[in-house]
Image (cartoon, rainbow, N blue to C red):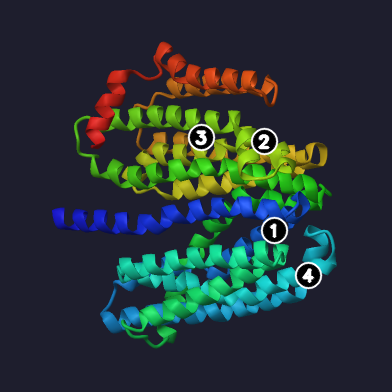
Amino acid sequence: MRGRLTQLARLTAGYSLASFVGPIFTILLTPLYTRVLQPADYAVLDTLTTIGLFVTALASLGLAPAATVLFYDGDDAYKRSVIATAALIGFAWSVVLGTVLWFAAPAIAAATLGGSSQAALIMVSAINLPMATLAGIIQAALRLRMAVKRANTLALSNLLLTVLLNIVFVLLLNMGVWGIQIAISLTTLWMVIAGVLMLRTEGWGRPTRLLVAPLIQAGLPLLPGALSLWALAYLDRLLLPAFEVSLDERGLYAIGAKLASMLAILTVPFQSAWGPLALAMRADQQAERTYAKVLTLFTAGALGLALGLALFARELLLIFTTPVYAAAAPYVGLLVYVAVANGATVTVSVGAALEKRTHIIGIATMVGAALNLSLNIILIPHYGAWGAAWATAIGYAATPILVYVWSQRVHPLPYQPGRTLVALGTQITLLLIGMALPELGWTSFGLRMLLLAAYPIALLALRVIEPREVRALLGRVG
């Protein structure tokens, strides 16, 4: 047992390097993009990214996690065949899907990018799709082989090459969105070539028809969940042009969403660590009390980070982008709740995980996505990008609420929802006061600093958190 836990800790620490550096590099590229691209151009890039993520999810067919399910069911030759068969299925299906995307590109560009003249940008994504699918399967193969160093080398080299190519094509050659698309294509090609060379040491297996049906059967049920996550995060980007929201407004909304996503860099490590730890401590006498405290403390802490990010969004945008993007700051105040909701979902799903009823999370995500779609359709025609922001925030908030209600039915835990609501109410109150202040100036800056400092003081005064609870939890986790 101890050996397996040590191995798990080592692998988790190893893979977390690339997982953490990836979002950092993505955010560091944003100042480069915004100094070259106007908001309308950034909206085109954001829409291309949305389309690319959607077709990539469709092309994947859930093959990477399906390969994980089947990988350890046989000897080494069988394992190689699993990877080879998954790669062949993914490549063949993505060629078909890419062909459809190629011919549909003019219509899609006319509907989403402001004109069919932008179709060539979508065609590049269609050409890139088979390579992107193979790259995903290769990364899964390296993880399954527990090749930590090779997996990290591949991921980090991809990130460095991405930055270098963007500097060349976007900054030096001033190729705009085209330069970004070319950089993406070249880095994806590099991922495939380098990944194939890395896997050569393990030997390539032969695809077999016997594995086709099991892989598809294991992967397809995962597809609705993946598409629901995509819908929650990106569906509004395609609905905004459908309701004739301008490219400039869409670009500002996209930058606001990008800044709000910075919060996830701080909350995702908690999500990754808490899930396994929660299950590991289930036999402890104080386990249920710990589960309850973690929800309160995480929510209070994440809301505090969200408050800081939202209060100083304009200053951050002025530092990392150009003045034209400062108008995106108000969107951040709503979109920061996305990361808070994601983390809260993990904390309230412990009961479902203990009872092995994890489908609850998938169903809640699909309901949240459906709610998001409905609200986008209702709100965007009247409120434009603000309608999309409200739809996204509400859709994400619905997921932890549903998971909480359904998990409590299968395995009740002594959570303290009253304290969580008090923390949320306190944070919203302080945020609204801050948003009513003048946008810039040292007086405004100082008052917003006072509002941020008032948040933990208010939580202590309202007994949402107590110093001894924080100390006890840190000692328990440590």
Q: Which class describes the residues within 10 Å of circle 4: few (<14), some (14-19), or many (20+)?
A: some
In this rendering, which labeled residue sits more in front, label 4 or label 1?
1
Closer to the chain start, of discs 4 and 3, is 4
Q: Is residue 319 left or right of residue 75?
A: right
Is 385 situated left or right of 187 in this image? right
Q: State the image quarter where residue 275 is shown.
A: top left
Look at 77% across and 44% down and name the residue there. Answer: 249
Report the residue marked by disc 1: 45
Q: Looking at the picture, how far across and down is residue 366, in whole percent?
A: 56, 49
Label 2 crowd (10 A; few <14 / some 14-19 / many >=20): many
Q: CA distance from mark 4 to mark 1?
A: 13 Å
Cα separation between marks 4 and 2: 31 Å
Give the label, 4 or 2, closer to the camera.
2
Is residue 179 or residue 56 the one in the foreground? 179
Q: Residue at x 41, y 35 (%)?
A: 409
Calculate the distance from the C-alpha at mark 3 to the C-alpha at mark 2. 27 Å
Residue, disc 3: 401
The residue indicated by pointer 2 is: 329
The image shows residue 400 at horizontal and vertical percentages of 49, 37
Where 98 falls versus 300 (above or below)? below
Marks 3/1: CA distance? 33 Å
Q: Position of residue 281 (x, y in %)?
A: 23, 40
Image point 38% across, 42% down: which residue?
270
Q: Which mark is residue 343?
A: none
- Whichever of labels 3 and 2 marks the residue nearer the N terminus, that label is 2
Q: Would you name the residue on which mark 4 appears?
A: 119
Q: Relative to 143, is 169 on the left or the right?
A: right
The reply to whether callout 4 and callout 3 are in contact (CB within 8 Å) is: no
Instruction: Label 4, secondary structure: give it.
Output: helix
- C-alpha distance separating marks 2 and 1: 19 Å
